[in-house]
């Protein structure tokens, strides 16, 4: 059984995601490594600078330096794919992963997570352009998946032009209900996206006026009366879009809520679910309007930015004492 301190050095949103994995309530979790990932943590460390002892200040300073070096290293990676063949994609994946593993932040995540943690390249082909990124997965130590398996599934999807098959595979890796995975892949040119169909029944609960990258706002302002929704339990993960009214998602989410609340302050877990929903709302709205906007840390209120702090620091803030 893991202990709180085993994951306390992880960014809070990762720590809580991975906590559900370590508790056996989800098969796995993941996080995209990108500019938002690095800038969010750096902004949080600056925004919530606290008067602490010399040792803590030194640790914070080293953390900030590691994040800046990691961001610089990530930006400097160049990926070339000679041709859209399995051999060339595997060659590029191997080289890209080798470069990713040299980034200090990847070592930090692997070192601080007590289960199976690994980084892989992530490929997406749209139109005539191949896009790439990086994703870190978190599993128990049970061989749920290997880097080779994940990369192969991704490459197969690119070559066969069947990316939805890879998304289904990812949904299984994340422990999402099968019915919600099916719902997510019910797409039609004559109907709204599944992201928007998932969120639309609750869209009027969002206070759009309070949205924005402004620490004067709180997630309480963005999502007032959230704790009174019984259906809030369905939003147990970021970037998970449950089928409206799905009893399986509600049951799984309620079990996750209860388990996390037994380990951490209830206000923290309320905010975790609230931020999951708010994040999904912003993503769904962007998809619905044809945009590509990803939520900016702090856009959902100052708690949104707080969740980029290490869990052990967040738990010392007055809101969660």
Image (cartoon, rainbow, N blue to C red):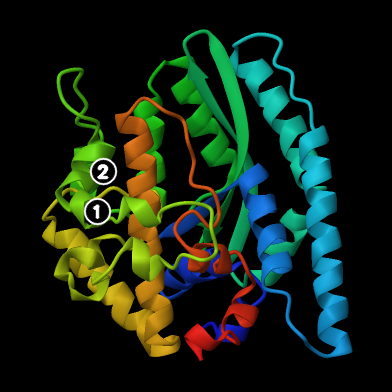
Residue 253 position (above or below residue 179): below
Question: Count of labels shown?
Answer: 2
Query: Is mark 2 in CB contact (under 8 Å) with mark 1?
Result: yes
Residue closest to the eye, 90 or 242: 242
The residue that appears at 63% across and 51% down in the rendered structure is 37
Is 39 displayed left or right of 274 in the figure?
right
**Label 2 crowding class (10 Å Cα cut-off): few <14, some 14-19, many 20+?**
many
Residue 215 position (above or below residue 183): below
Q: Which residue is mark 1?
A: 177
Q: Indicate the secondary structure of the residue bearing disc 2.
A: helix
Residue closest to the eye, 225 or 250: 225
Q: Indicate the secondary structure of the residue bearing disc 1.
A: loop
Is 83 displayed left or right of 22 in the figure?
right
Where in the figure is residue 278, as x and y percent of width and height?
A: 36, 55
The residue that appears at 17% across and 69% down in the rendered structure is 229
Where in the figure is residue 292, as x and y percent of width and height?
A: 46, 30
Residue 56 position (above or below residue 113): below
Q: Which residue is mark 2?
A: 181
Decide if residue 138 is in sight here.
yes
The residue that appears at 39% across and 48% down in the rendered structure is 239
Splitting the image into 4 quarters, where does residue 4 fall?
bottom right
Decide if residue 24 is in sight here.
no
Q: CA distance from mark 2 to mark 1?
A: 6 Å
Residue closest to the eye, 98 or 16: 16
Is 244 displayed left or right of 238 in the figure?
left
Where in the figure is residue 132, as x and y percent of width and height?
A: 61, 28
Splitting the image into 4 quarters, where does residue 312 fall?
bottom right
**Label 1 crowding class (10 Å Cα cut-off): few <14, some 14-19, many 20+?**
some
Which disc is residue 319 wearing? none
Where in the figure is residue 130, as x and y percent of width and height?
A: 58, 17
């Amino acid at each position: 059984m893991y202990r709180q301190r085993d994951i306390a050095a992880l960014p809070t949103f990762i720590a809580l995601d991975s906590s559900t994995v370590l508790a056996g309530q989800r098969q796995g979790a993941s996080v995209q490594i990108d500019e938002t990932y690095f800038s969010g943590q750096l902004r949080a460390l600056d925004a919530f600078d606290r008067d602490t002892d010399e040792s803590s200040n030194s640790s914070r300073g080293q953390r900030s330096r590691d994040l800046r070096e990691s961001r610089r290293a990530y930006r400097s990676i160049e990926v070339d794919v000679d041709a859209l063949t399995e051999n060339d994609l595997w060659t590029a994946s191997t080289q890209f992963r080798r470069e990713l593993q040299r980034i200090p932040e990847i070592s930090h995540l692997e070192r601080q997570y007590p289960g199976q943690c690994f980084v892989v390249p992530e490929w997406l082909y749209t139109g005539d352009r191949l896009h790439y990124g990086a994703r870190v997965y978190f599993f128990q130590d049970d061989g749920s998946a290997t880097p080779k398996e994940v990369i192969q599934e991704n490459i197969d999807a690119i070559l066969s032009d069947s990316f939805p098959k890879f998304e289904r595979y990812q949904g299984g890796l994340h422990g999402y209900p099968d019915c919600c995975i099916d719902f997510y892949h019910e797409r039609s040119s004559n109907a709204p996206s599944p992201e928007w169909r998932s969120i639309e029944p609750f869209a009027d609960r969002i206070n759009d006026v309070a949205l924005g990258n402004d620490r004067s706002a709180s997630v309480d302002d963005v999502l007032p009366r959230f704790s009174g929704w019984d259906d809030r339990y369905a939003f147990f993960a970021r970037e998970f879009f449950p089928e409206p009214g799905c009893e399986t998602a509600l049951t799984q989410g309620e079990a996750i809520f209860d388990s996390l609340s037994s380990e951490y302050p209830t206000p923290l877990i309320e905010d975790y679910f609230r931020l999951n929903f708010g994040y999904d709302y912003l993503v769904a709205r962007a998809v619905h309007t044809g945009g590509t906007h990803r939520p900016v840390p702090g856009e959902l209120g100052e708690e949104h930015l707080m969740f980029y702090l290490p869990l052990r620091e967040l738990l010392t803030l007055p809101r969660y004492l």
